[in-house]
Amino acid sequence: MFSGIAQNSESLPSSFEIVAVDQLVESFHPAFNFFISGICQNYPRLYPIFKYKDELFYTLHLALETGFIHKYGASFAEQFYNLCRNKINNESQQPLTQRDKNLALLHLVLIPYLMLKFRNYFNKIQLQEREQLLRGGNPQEQINQQNLENWKDLLIKLKILSKKIFRKGFPYVFFVAQFSKLIYFILYSFELSKYPSISFRLLNQSIQRQPPDLSKLANSSESKTLFLTFTDYFLDYSRNFFLCSVLGFKFMEWWYGNEEIQSSNKSVNTLPPPPTAPPPVAGSYSLPSSINQCAICKRDRQNPTVTLTGFVFCYRCIFDYIEKTGECPITGIPLETQTLRRVYESENY
């Protein structure tokens, strides 16, 4: 019954290989974020780069996939497992044309980037609604009131309407995309479809194992320029480099996780002292003279809230400040509103 999982045809990859390709791609992004965050922690001047870590990652991803898709007719992860793509034309498989390769790049880079941004924006909207409920308001009433107040302003009206439509429609679109992906994967596992995912069906492309001499044919050009030679060397060794990067990330994750487990078993007396406060940046807010005052409004703190940098502010002050600037008002370190934590100073909270 489950013979389809192994795929009887020797040229077709198994379902396990398809899953391995997807997992290899998904492991690159957290490894890259870990690398960027480590650099920014050691060099605070590079913190603005951290805000655009996703754009930087997908730019490098686009450059890498462009080289592989044009040289091997496969993505980086697919070529790593000796797979390649073919165009399905009248039940026959043909090599990818230039247009097919561009469409494949669109599927490999642009669509995952847009889905990531849509998910982040959706999570941000949900966070804003929860914060509004905590403040005692109703997000829907606020939208209706703002819609009435800005009725003459067409741009604001369209922005509110589009935000509301996105909030209601994105979960359904995301569910349909993931469900269709699951359905095609099940059909491919039981040899009921030649497309391992919905994206391959839309592109009308299939995936199979590379012929033994494909890599030789790709490198059989008699004359190469210095740039092409360098590109070939980069593509040949990049997969080993990225694989080592992922393994290094997993090792560092295990290493620091092991340190946390060991430190939790030690007594309280052996705990190291807390780190020193980050230095303030030029033009930032100064610390108030009283420890009970907020550095932003210079008044006694209301609903005290602590940031990842260790400073305590009024909840409304620090939330609105991070929403506008995305950084700590004292140190300038990038922050997000979902990292804010309330400080309970008495038993009557």
Image: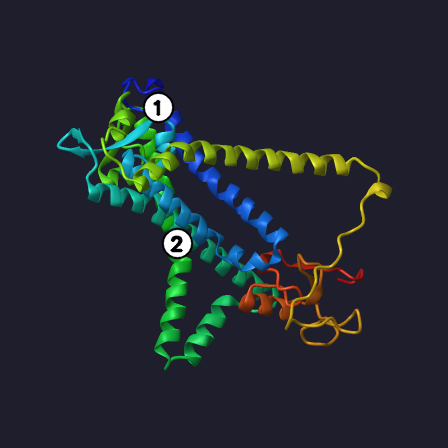
Left or right of residue 44, residue 57 in this image: left
Image coords of residue 47 (percent x, y): 57, 58
Pinpoint residue 83: horizontal percent, then vertical percent: 32, 28
Indicate which disc residue 170 carries.
Answer: 2
Between the C-alphas of marks 2 and 1, the distance is: 32 Å
Foreground mark, 2 or 1, reads 1
**Where is residue 44 shown, x and y percent of the image?**
61, 57
Amino acid type, callout 2: Phe
Q: Is residue 169 left or right of residue 259?
A: left
Give the mark nearest the N terminus, 2 or 1. 1
Q: Amino acid at mark 1?
A: Ser
Between residues 176 and 117, which one lies in front from this camera angle? 117
Q: Which residue lies at the image location 34% right of the left edge and 32% below the top edge?
A: 185
* Local secondary structure at mark 2: helix
Q: Is residue 20 left or right of residue 197?
A: right
Residue at 50% of width from left, 67% of height from top?
139
Q: Quadrant of residue 4?
A: top left
Q: Decide: marks 2, 1 in contact (CB < 8 A)?
A: no
Question: Within the image, what quadrant is residue 2 found in?
Answer: top left
Quarter of the picture containing the N terminus is: top left
Q: Quadrant of residue 46?
A: bottom right
Disc ID at residue 97:
none
Residue labelled with disc 1? 14
Quadrant location of the C terminus? Answer: bottom right
Judge by depth and name the residue closer to the eye, 309 or 38. 38
